[in-house]
Image (tube, coloured by chain):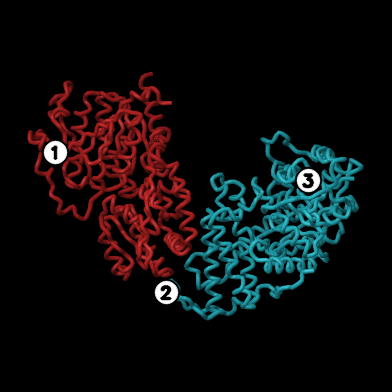
Chain colours: A red, B cyan
Amino acid sequence: MHLNVAAMKVLMLGWEFPPIFSGGLGIATYGMVKALRHHTDIRLIIPSYSGSLNIPDVDIIGLNKLSESELTTDQFKYEAMTTAVHRLPLTISPYRSINDEIIKNKLDQHDLSSDDVRTIETIHDIFSEKDMYGGDILKKIELYTHLAERIASDKDYDVIHAHDWVTFSAGVRIKKMSGKPLILHVHSLETDRAGEACRNGIYNLEKDAMVDADRIFAVSQFTKDQIIKHYAIDAEKISVVHNGIDPGEITRKPHQLRDKLVVFLGRITHQKGPEFLLETVEKVSRVYSRVKFVVAGTGDQFAYLLETSAYKKMGIKFIFAGFLSKARVDELLSMADVHFMPSVSEPFGITALEAVQHRVPSVLSMQSGAAEVLKAALKADFWDTDKYANYIYALLKYDALNNELSEHAKSELDHITWDHAAKKILDIYQQLIQSENN
Amino acid sequence: MPSICFYFQVHQPFRLKPYDCFKIGHDHEYEDEAKNRDILDRVSEKCYLTTNRLLLDLIEQYRGKFKIAYSISGTALEQMEKYRPDVLRSFQDLAKSSCVEFLSETYHHSLSYLYSKDEFIRQVGLHREKIQQLFRQTPTVFRNTELIYNNEIANFISDLGYKAIICEGLDHVLGYRSPNFLYHPPGNSRIISLLKNYKLSDDIAFRFSNKDWSEWPLTAPKFATWVHQAAGNGDTINLFMDYETFGEHQWPETGIFDFLAHLPAEILKHPDFDFKTPSEVIESFKVRGDYDVHPLSSWADLERDLSAWLGNSLQHDAMERIYKLEKRIKDTNEPWMIETWAKLLTSDHFYYMSTKYWNDGDVHKYFSHYNTPYDAYINFMNVVTDLEHVLEVNFEKTLRDDDRPEAKIIIDRSVLQPVQNLTSSLPHQVL
């Protein structure tokens, strides 16, 4: 089927990558690259690569470990450094965490236009920060764009595949420089993160890039609809590529607690619906007392959640676990009774699939991509806390429902794989390259 | 002289209202009265009244030559009494024609035979009383819910005194034999099995309006020629179907009423053919052999088994949970409790929980008012949970350690007034 695809070369632009990530983007990039590598040659440029997760046959370039040779190609040499860097009029950082104030901003010490930044050590330094979105993210993006363009100057690829707004500028620049087709992969939109009505700098960046792109991948029909509605992009240009999950057996480790556990995984931001979480906890507690809600994640609404739960005397219902590593999330899911995702606007929600993998049934917001792919889940509109509470109550109370849902959902995962997503992606790569050649 | 034997199924369940966890312990009214009334109104206008009128006209027109049979569930009759007495009267008019036979079934259209013989006998008794009271007939032919059938059921029904039982004509049981003859269960000559001719029945009930079907459009003359082919090779052609076929499943625009209106004339054009009711059929023909069915069968879906009601663990769980309450409920001796419980046994509640054809969103979804099978299960289980609370608090006074913080419930005694003056005593002998 993909006979002439074997030689296809993909330049992939990513931002998060395991084990360094804050959301689903890193997991998705990793899963996708792993499935695609069997069919294509991939060069992946990411800001920070720890090297602990090596993928055979994939050329992963972490800017934190960039070598001089990767920067200096015959065509480009040092010219790039002397070209003007356009400052983007960005006004909001979407992933601001409560720790922002105390993060030492290393970028501030460097001026991109100065010679200072040209030293490889400085570049390593800038991209070695733990918080992907911390510091001056805009300067980081500028530098990323700049360096990616230099790395890509050999034009040794057939298609450019850029993940989320942070890499979109680089994608557009490389397309203009190389003339190769550009795919933008939308895992999340500014309208999800900052609210439907937002029309800020990031929104404009996303919109302009989507106009320039040859094709857009949306992680869900939900996201595709949002792109059409809020960004006025032609539906024909957008293909839905649902995320997948690697198949795998995981052992349940039933807990010995008296209370049942409902888990919430994700950043505690408006987008994730913390106020609806709180309301639901209150309502469930009225009808089912032996339950605790474990909140794993952090974000700018953490203080709100903590303070309001205390004020409402609901503190005893919560366990705040903070940000957890993948291993700890797995551990938590292996003993959880219910997974709860009340997001206001969730492009995909890969945690729902992780829950399924651990045989934990999900109560999901209908405004999510996961709700599209998972039939065996209980779904309600993000604001419908009565319905959420009724569903959670039922899952806690009726074992047969819990079993039926988790078993049924597990069997659904057979069709929600990265291989499945990769097939779709490869087909579109091929279409783009062919129309390019014609 | 072969006969056409029509039997139509009429049934309406008492659908439950949206009942979330917050209602448990506070709200003991489970029925969705508005929805039940609306649906009965709709089906009455589209099907019952129109079809009843047409059939009564045909009966009068053919003066004794056109005959039919009905099985109407007790829950459907009760809803007609409550919301549409005019519809009930039109069935009573048909009953007076002496060309219409009424069959026996479980009052609550339940699967009680599988779970409790006591409850099964009680429901059959209630239904008999209802048929006697409303239609002045005593049924002699039995029809189990959804034609659920095997040898054991046939023998049990025979022990209750019935002369015949309705069932599906299964190809794998019949083999080369035709469903158009009378059969016995093996070793029991006291009861006759009346087999549905599913090919001809489904031509009307399912395929009639299907434009992809090679025989579309189906006309009365065409159908009559198919029926006439049985001449010399069959005694009775049993056409069994849901009554809603007429006007509800097959809309008037499909020509279903024209078809029905012209059918008697076309059938009777052949001098050897006539129409008979089930009890006439069994008096008129000889039994030709054994019909040997071991695993439970039904008339549902392609599988013709029980998987529509007992196909997943939710359905089993809900079914077991509700039947487990039987003794405790009956010990209360409270008509409201017994009736409320029995209404929860209606097969439809479990059908709504089916995940079988969920992916195709086909016939099962058409018959369900729930968005998902999970919603159906949750709603049902919440109601059962409340009924258990009512039992414990009002009748047993032995509150168990429960997860509800405010376990003590004050119940308004007025809700315990029987909504229906139904007997709650178990008839030892139905017949």
Residue B392 x, y percent position in the rendering: 53, 76
**Label 3: chain letter:** B
Which quadrant of the view contains residue B206?
Answer: top right
Residue B163 x, y percent position in the rendering: 82, 59
Q: Earlier in the sequence, mark 2 or mark 3?
A: 3
Image point 33% across, 44% down: which residue? A188
Which mark's residue is nearer the viewer, 1 or 3?
3
* Residue identifier under label 3: B179
A211 vs A363: above or below: above
Q: Is residue B281 left or right of residue A175?
A: right
Residue B310 x, y percent position in the rendering: 59, 55
* Residue identifier under label 1: A124
**Label 1: chain letter:** A
Which mark's residue is nearer the viewer, 2 or 3?
3
- Give the Cα separation between the discs numbered 2 and 3: 60 Å
- Give the Cα separation between the discs numbered 1 and 3: 83 Å
For this orientation, the residue located farthest to the left is A115
Image point 25% across, 31% down: which residue? A59
What secondary structure is marked by label 3?
loop
Q: Are marks 2 and 3 in contact (CB under 8 Å)?
A: no
Q: What kind of residue is marked 2? A: Pro
